[in-house]
């Protein structure tokens, strides 16, 4: 079998396994920290992809390439699938523009109606709640503060924004 | 006269559309491994060059459209990687079949694309993410804390949503029509498909309203 096809089949199969785990787990009981959960599933699947690529490449009649080649190629493909799945999740779940598209696909409406349905306070509150659930922020009364994990990411944000000279951004 | 090569060919293996001895197979596999690792090194070297070019352009030029600049630099570096792979590793290519050379070149390009994609994700997070902006304002505030009022003042979501609507209208994703004296927004065809598809995906995966 051709090495490219072989790697694509293994990584494609592994990615379908990830999708299946994702769908079943989210439909039964959605995890609180979704992104962390999805990344953990990816890590486990990638580990098994490694093992599967190694053993199958020894058993299959391959027209070229060693086990190392199959390991690297199958893993690279899977890593690309992993990143695309995260981008898809980010786009569908967090994007304001997609949320507006969903609201307008349901019904044509004016800006005022749209702003009532997609309440800005709720949109911000949703993000702050997720940051608390993710362990980045701590809320005491009406005051938000950084947790050690949040401080670490805040430093990345500060130095990253300084590095790109991009202002506050967002 | 003893043919020592034939003595080594006890077992035959089929690879690259030919039968080879165990010794020949082992030599070929070793060369393939070296070429494979060279592809990795090539991808890493070009990724470092890409990063250097991004740093230099962000520090010495006034970059107005960063995503465009980064995409342009990627398009410059990709052929450079293939040239590097083809010429610099040419001695290694002699020993392995052309199909394998092409596949290692492809893998090199895939790895570089993967690094680029990862890098763009990090950039997007730093420059566009609302959560990162909240963290940024929190660490730069006087005592490292913010109230909900402070966050709303720094980041007025209503303005952000209105800006996103304006941009969607500007880019032709949403149209605005006057119906009965009122300005009504609606999705254009493709954007409507995106909206419906996203809603179906969210429902299917049980993600909640999100946004």
Image: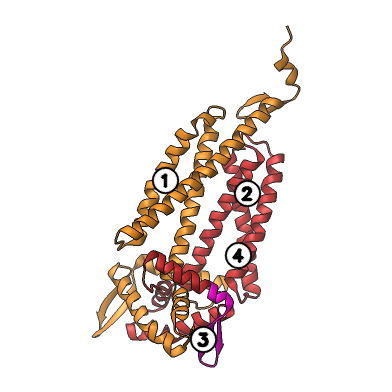
Chain identifier of the red chain:
A
* Whether residue B99 is situated above or below residue A36 in the rendered picture: above
The spot of residue A120 in percent (x, y) is: 41, 84
Q: Which residue is mark 1?
A: B78
Where residue B115 sits: x, y (%)? 49, 53
Q: Tag 3: Cα neighbours inside 10 Å, few (<14), some, or many (≥20)?
A: many
User: In the image, are marks 2 and 4 on the same chain?
Assistant: yes
**What stretch of residues is rendered in magenta?**
A137-152
**Of A4 and B186, the residue lying toward us:** A4
The answer to whether residue A44 shows anywhere in this view is: yes
Q: Earlier in the sequence, mark 4 or mark 3?
A: 4
Find the distance from the CA under tag 4 to the CA under tag 3.
Answer: 27 Å
Drawn colour of chain B?
Answer: orange
Q: Which mark is residue A144?
A: 3
Label 4 Cα crowd, 10 Å radius (few <14 / some 14-19 / many 20+):
some
Q: CA distance from mark 2 to mark 1?
A: 26 Å
Which residue in the protein does label 2 denote?
Answer: A10
Label 3 SS: strand
Q: Is residue B193 visible?
A: no
Question: Could you give the CA–CA distance between mark 1 and mark 4, rounded to whole angstroms?
Answer: 29 Å
- Same chain for labels 3 and 1? Say yes or no: no
Q: Is residue A118 left or right of residue B8?
A: left
Q: Is residue A7 positioned above or below B69 on the image?
A: above
């Amino acid at each position: 079998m051709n090495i490219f096809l072989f790697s694509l089949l293994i990584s494609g199969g592994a990615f379908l396994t990830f999708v299946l785990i994702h769908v079943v787990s989210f439909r039964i009981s959605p995890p609180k920290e979704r992104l962390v959960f999805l990344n953990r599933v990816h890590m486990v699947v990638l580990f098994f992809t490694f093992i599967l690529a190694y053993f199958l490449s020894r058993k299959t009649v391959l027209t070229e390439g060693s086990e190392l080649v199959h390991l690297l190629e199958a893993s690279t493909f899977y890593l690309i699938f992993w990143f695309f799945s995260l981008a898809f999740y980010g786009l569908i779940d967090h994007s304001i523009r997609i949320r507006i598209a969903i609201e307008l696909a349901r019904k044509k409406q004016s800006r005022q109606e749209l702003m009532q349905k997609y309440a800005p306070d709720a949109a911000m509150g949703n993000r702050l709640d997720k940051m608390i659930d993710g362990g980045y922020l701590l809320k005491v009364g009406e005051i938000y503060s950084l947790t050690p994990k949040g401080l670490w990411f805040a430093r990345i944000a500060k130095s990253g924004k300084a590095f790109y000279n991009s202002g506050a951004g967002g | 006269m003893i043919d020592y090569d034939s003595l080594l060919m006890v077992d035959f293996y089929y690879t690259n559309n030919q039968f080879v001895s165990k010794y020949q197979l082992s030599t070929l596999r070793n060369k393939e491994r070296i070429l494979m690792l060279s592809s990795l090194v090539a991808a890493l070297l070009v990724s470092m060059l890409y990063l250097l070019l991004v740093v230099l352009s962000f520090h010495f030029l006034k970059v107005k459209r960063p995503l465009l600049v980064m995409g342009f630099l990627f398009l410059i570096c990709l052929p450079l990687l293939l040239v590097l792979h083809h010429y610099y590793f040419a001695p290694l290519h002699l020993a392995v079949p052309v199909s394998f050379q092409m596949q290692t070149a492809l893998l090199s390009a895939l790895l570089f694309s993967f690094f680029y994609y990862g890098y763009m994700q990090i950039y997007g997070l730093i420059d566009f993410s609302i959560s990162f902006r909240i963290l940024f304002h929190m660490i730069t505030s006087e005592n490292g804390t913010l109230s909900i009022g402070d966050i709303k003042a720094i980041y007025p979501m209503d303005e952000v949503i209105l800006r996103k609507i304006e941009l969607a209208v500007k880019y032709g994703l949403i149209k605005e029509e006057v119906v009965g004296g009122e300005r009504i927004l609606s999705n254009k065809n493709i954007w409507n498909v995106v909206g419906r598809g996203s809603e179906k995906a969210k429902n299917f995966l049980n993600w909640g309203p999100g946004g």
